């Protein structure tokens, strides 16, 4: 981006916003900006000065979003140039170096704000990389970023995914669409990758998130360790990730329950990719709404996974979501055998861990059954959360007598 002919965009903000930036918060909303020296352009670098006219932060300006400024660097000013970007990328990659071996080729390389890349995610699926953008402010920098990725990672291809709220603006302003291959070879079919030695497909062009729910890897591993000899119900099963791990762990049978025929077909394909893993496990599918199916059936299971999509996509839905999580747990407990295990998960950022765990524990207590809490879990190490709003994934394991 060539902004040489214009003075640097300078922002002055409220005292509360200054404190938030110093405390590590990565965003400024529009109503926090009290003054700017000129109208900004989405994607340009802006500088925030404090009340004493000292440098506070540098970041990306986004004039089309309620989040008007996304922090790249705070504290002592630094030159944000090609070398700086290269260091930012290599730092994020090095954090993942000790986490995975050649049996896991699908994981997150950059987790947005928590890795210093606000509004940008980079996921790996074997030799395919997927960049997902949540702000159009990255578009002027996209070519630079893709070049750095090629230099440091040498992927076969890089796919661009766009958050729904920026798709029209990016297509209009940059002639790029969600699912575009922006570097490398075309995709003839879905990408296959490994997770703990299990083979999965990822629809990196059209699938949810970047093609797969990589963030549940650690919980899938725990389910595998708990599944031996159990009958397993995987509700909101999506493409069968928990089910495959349960089968590998020695489950006698696994049932996928999902309302979508499309995702159930994906689960069948994933099971077909792992014939040696599932050979001794009976597998069946039920296409239904879990909230409707659970109260109408009496089948008992030794392990039940509750992993619904976000039930609170905005703050106004928080109270209803907490009730729904509790109701879902109550319905599931009624289907658990003696010594049965419940894993309940939430990916709703607007429902905090204490609220979610409290709803599940309360439902367990109301069942009248004795239970013990095995553990609670949060986000995996490749999905770090450096500030509160980034904390979204929660899981709780309960064993019932």
Image: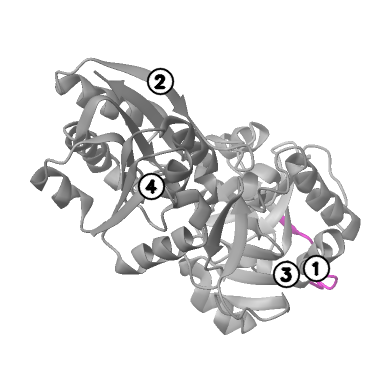
Furthest-right residue in this view: 83
Local SS, label 2: strand
Assess disc 1: are there few (<14), some (14-19) or many (≥20) residues with their C-alpha within 10 Å of its C-alpha.
some
3D distance between C-alphas at marks 4 and 2? 25 Å
Please report contact status of discs 1 and 3: CB closer than 8 Å, yes or no: yes
Using the image as rendered, state which of residue 196 and residue 210 is in the foreground: 196
Residue 361 location, x and y as percent? Answer: 28, 23
User: For residue 5: magenta?
Assistant: yes
Furthest-left residue in this view: 296
To which residue does mark 2 refer? Answer: 374
| Image-based side of 173 in relation to 238, left or right | right
Foreground tag (4 vs 3):
4
Picture residue at 72% right of the left edge, 69% below the top: 142
Q: Earlier in the sequence, mark 2 or mark 1?
A: 1
To which residue does mark 3 refer? Answer: 142
Q: Main secondary structure of the magenta part?
A: loop
Local SS, label 3: helix
Q: Looking at the image, can residue 43 be seen?
A: no
Assess disc 3: are there few (<14), some (14-19) or many (≥20) residues with their C-alpha within 10 Å of its C-alpha.
some
Q: Looking at the image, can residue 355 be seen?
A: yes
Picture residue at 36% right of the left edge, 44% below the top: 307
Q: Earlier in the sequence, mark 1 or mark 4?
A: 1
User: For residue 3: magenta?
Assistant: yes
Foreground tag (1 vs 4):
4
To which residue does mark 1 refer? Answer: 144
| Image-based side of 394 in relation to 360, left or right | right
Picture residue at 44% right of the left edge, 36% below the top: 223
Using the image as rendered, state which of residue 225 and residue 77 is in the foreground: 225
Picture quadrant of residue 172: bottom right
For the record, the magenta segment spans 1-10
């Amino acid at each position: 981006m060539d902004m040489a002919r214009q003075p640097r965009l300078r922002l002055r903000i409220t005292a509360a916003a200054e404190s938030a930036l110093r405390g590590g918060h990565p965003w400024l909303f529009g109503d926090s900006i009290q003054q700017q020296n000129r109208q900004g352009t989405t994607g340009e670098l802006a500088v925030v000065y404090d009340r004493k006219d000292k440098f506070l932060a540098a970041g990306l300006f986004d004039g089309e979003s309620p989040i008007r400024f996304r922090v790249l660097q705070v504290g002592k000013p630094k030159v944000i140039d090609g070398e700086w970007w290269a260091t930012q990328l290599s730092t994020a990659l090095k954090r993942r170096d000790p986490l995975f071996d050649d049996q896991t080729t699908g994981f997150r390389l950059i987790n947005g704000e928590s890795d210093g890349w606000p509004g940008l995610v980079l996921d790996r699926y074997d030799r395919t990389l997927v960049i997902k953008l949540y702000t159009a402010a990255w578009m002027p920098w996209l070519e630079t970023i893709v070049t750095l990725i090629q230099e440091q990672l040498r992927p076969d291809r890089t796919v661009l995914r766009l958050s729904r709220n920026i798709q029209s603006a990016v297509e209009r302003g940059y002639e790029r669409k969600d699912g575009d291959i922006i570097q490398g070879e075309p995709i003839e079919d879905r990408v296959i990758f490994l997770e703990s030695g299990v083979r999965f497909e990822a629809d990196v062009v059209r699938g949810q998130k970047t093609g797969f729910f990589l963030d549940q890897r650690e919980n899938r591993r725990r389910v595998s360790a708990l599944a031996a000899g159990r009958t397993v119900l995987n509700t909101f099963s999506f493409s069968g990730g928990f089910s495959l791990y349960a089968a590998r762990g020695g489950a006698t049978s696994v049932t996928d329950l999902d309302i979508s025929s499309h995702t159930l077909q994906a689960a069948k394909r994933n099971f077909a990719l792992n014939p040696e893993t599932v050979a001794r496990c009976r597998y069946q599918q039920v296409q239904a709404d879990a909230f409707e199916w659970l109260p109408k059936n009496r089948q008992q299971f030794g392990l039940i996974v509750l992993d619904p999509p976000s039930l609170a996509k905005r703050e106004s839905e928080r109270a209803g979501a907490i009730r729904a999580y509790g109701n879902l747990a109550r319905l599931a407990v009624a289907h658990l055998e003696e010594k049965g295990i419940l894993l309940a998960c939430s990916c709703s950022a607007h429902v905090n861990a204490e609220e979610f765990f409290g709803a599940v524990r309360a439902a367990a207590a109301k069942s009248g059954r004795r239970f013990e809490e095995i553990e609670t879990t949060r986000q995996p190490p490749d999905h770090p959360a450096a500030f509160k709003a980034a904390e979204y994934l929660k899981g709780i394991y309960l064993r019932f007598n």
